[in-house]
Amino acid sequence: MRIVLLGPPGAGKGTQAKMIARDLGISVLSTGDIIRLAIKNQTPWGKKAEKFVESGGLVPDEVVIGIVKEKIDQDDLWSGFILDGFPRTIKQAEALEAMLGERNLSLDAVLYFAVDKEEVIKRLSSRRVCENCQATYNLLSNPPLQEGICDRCGGKLVQRDDDKPEVIRQRLETYEKETKPLIDFYQKRNLLYVIPSNGPIEEVYNKVKEVLEEVTAR
Ligand code: ADP
Ligand code: ADP
Ligand code: ZN
């Protein structure tokens, strides 16, 4: 199954991606995680990407498209993947369509996580991530067992630099302008499934499962 997860920052894409991956055994490709790792390691393109991420903008299309293609090839994921955070622009969506088309493949579904703006701001400001294994927590909805410490690996939990209020505001603007048009793009291709996502994690996941069953049965 080839799935794209779409939605504003903080909608819960990463959280749901991990749950789908665990249950269906499909690999997740998160462009945000790949980009953050490259910045942390200060690789040549990681250095260039840093200023875009810090300011709440997008890393240039050519760079991200190149990374995704390379990663799908490298990990041999053409038969199945969950894309978390890609595509984020029409250009990226067209590039993805072309990559798949070259291989006579297509997407099975695009899950759009629909959440109110206030809820998204609340989720982002209370998000904490493990510095060591990238596990995601939430101070309000999904706290770790022990404050400041990752349940899975004992690593330190930190706030992402781009989860500070000024950057959150800019990321939401970037989303409205660059990414929201993808809803229409995928609706036209009959691939869009709307997941109402204001509720708790498990409730959202139940809807995801329902939709994926429907997609499989199609
Ligand atoms: P995204 O990948 O879309 O940016 P995340 O999966 O990182 O979103 O979720 C954003 C934050 O909100 C995290 O702290 C996560 O633990 C929390 N979260 C995710 N889904 C929900 C939900 N349905 N209700 C409340 N909090 C959630
Ligand atoms: P969130 O889901 O919370 O918005 P991500 O972890 O998906 O965050 O992405 C973090 C940042 O990485 C984005 O704000 C953007 O700067 C960059 N990024 C991630 N994916 C893409 C993409 N597909 N195209 C361009 N930039 C991206
Ligand atoms: Zn950890």
Image (cartoon, rainbow, N blue to C red):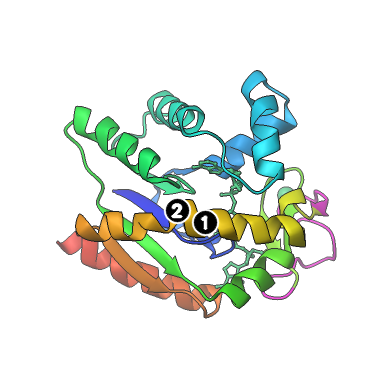
From the top left corner, tell me how far across and down residue 94 is, in percent: 30, 39
Residue underneath mark 1: 175
Tally the marks: 2
Q: Residue at x 49, y 48 (%)?
A: 85
Q: Note whether 60 is above or below 55 in the view shown.
A: above
Question: In screen coordinates, is 117 left or right of 74?
Answer: right
For the point 21% across and 58% down, the residue is 188
Q: In the rendered image of this protein, does residue 97 appear above or below residue 202? A: above
The residues colored magenta run: 140-157
Residue 67 percent across, percent down from the top left:
48, 28
Q: Is residue 140 above or below residue 81?
A: below
Q: Amino acid at mark 2?
A: Thr
In percent of the image, x 27 and y 39: which residue is there?
97
Secondary structure, mark 2, is helix
- Between residues 34 and 79, which one lies in front from this camera angle? 34
- Residue 150 counted in the magenta span: yes
State if disc 2 and disc 1 touch (CB < 8 Å). yes
Residue kind at label 1, given as amino acid type: Tyr
User: Quick check: can you spot residue 64?
Assistant: yes
The picture quadrant where one finds residue 99 is top left
Q: Which mark is residue 179?
A: 2
Asked whether residue 151 is in view, the answer is no
- Element marked by disc 1: helix
> With 22 as the anchor, is 210 left or right in this view?
left
Number of other residues with Cα within 10 Å of mark 1, as a class: few under 14, some 14 to 19, many 20 or more: many
